[in-house]
Amino acid sequence: MFTELDIIFLTLSIAEFLIGMLGNMFIGLVNCSEWVKNQNISLADFIFTCLAISRISQLSVLLFESFTMTLSLYLYFSYKLAKSITLLWRITNHLTTWLATCLSIFYLLKIAHFSNSLFLWLKFRMNRVFLMILVFSLFFLILDFLLLEAFNDLFLKVYIMDEYNMTIYIDERKTLFVETLTLLSLTYLLPVVLSLTSLFLLFLSLVRHIRNLQLNSMSSRDSSTEAHKRAIKMMMSFLFLFLVHCFSTQVTSWIFLIFWNNKFAKFVTLAAYVFPSGHSFILILGNSKLRQKALKLLWHLKSALKKRKSVTALQIDFPEPFQRY
């Protein structure tokens, strides 16, 4: 039987899930339709599409996990299924994190202007660079799997022990819990460092570009300056949401470890929806093609609603005998 807290939690989870699916499915459908139509896709659109697909998967895993926490299915489901949910979460979270990091690096290489030979080498080989980054990220995914093998045996016992035995178990294994959670937290460190470095270098490029324009007595509002500013805004919003996501993910793990029997603990997991849901709309607003498609769709929806209202008003104004014909 659902309690009031369970209903509130599920309602919020479903609402965040639908918002995230709306934004990510829109990105995926627009880019896939353009891909099929033109028989070609740019690197940016390819990253956008992969990111949207991975986030759709991540949101699905999050929603399923929300239902399992509400229904207490961990008490009845097998260990293998519980372990599979954890692994799916880590895989989808890993993909979304590294693809979003690739997008930050793409903005840096595409927009920034540096005369450094290494930067120019990377700039003219972007396809290879992103392939290398994704292959390199697989090592961190393997590390995640190895840590989870050690951690799952500890953490999943939260759901199969009674309160007294669980308290004793946590006290005995507290050091191992802390060490494993700390190592799992460190897997976010490199994506954060890469994104911060990209943001910092892009900001330096903007400062240098504006300084060169001022020295040449030119306006500082040219297309390159605006592109720098848009990219910086998008990367700052990404970093903010990403840090919120990392913080909420880690806090959730700690709270379920320390307050595993608290009925309010599961509400912390709602913050995990913010990054895959909110960042998709930031990407739509920051990309001219997606923004124009979204505005066009909204205009069609608005026109359809106006048309429907006008038809309904006409039906009300006509006498009933005329409405039959």
Image (cartoon, helix red, strand yellow):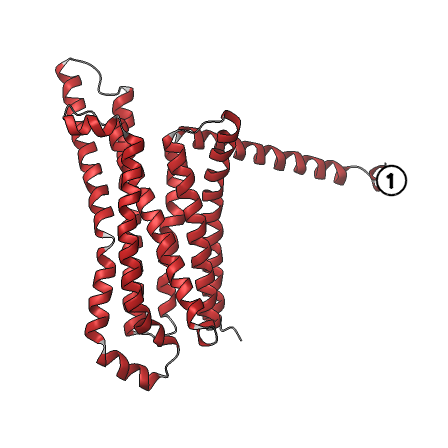
At a point 44% along the width and 45% down the height, the residue shown is 53
**Which structural element holds mark 1?**
helix
- Under mark 1, the amino acid is Pro
Q: Position of residue 275 (x, y in %)?
A: 35, 50
Q: Is residue 61 above or below residue 313?
A: below
- Answer left or right for 214 relative to 241: left
Q: How many marks?
A: 1
In the orientation shown, which residue stands out farthest toward the bottom?
164
Question: Where does residue 203 sit, x and y in percent of width and height?
Answer: 19, 33
Label 1: few (<14), some (14–19) or many (≥20) C-alpha neighbours in 10 Å: few
- Displayed quadrant of residue 313: top right
* Residue 66 placement (x, y as % from top left): 44, 63
Q: Residue at x 35, y 63 (%)?
A: 268
Res. 202 in view? yes
Task: Please state if 48 lies on the left or on the right of 125 as rendered.
Answer: right
From what the image shows, is residue 229 above or below residue 75?
Answer: above
Q: Which residue is mark 1?
A: 321
- For the question of whether residue 230 can be seen, the reply is no
Q: Position of residue 273 (x, y in %)?
A: 39, 54
The C terminus is located in which quarter? top right
Q: Is residue 249 above or below residue 259?
A: above
Picture quadrant of residue 154:
bottom left
Specify whether 144 is left or right of 302: left
Q: Quadrant of residue 111?
A: top left
- Residue at x-position 39% and y-position 79%: 160
> Viewer-proximal residue, 5 or 70?
70
Seen at 53% across and 76% down, the residue is 1
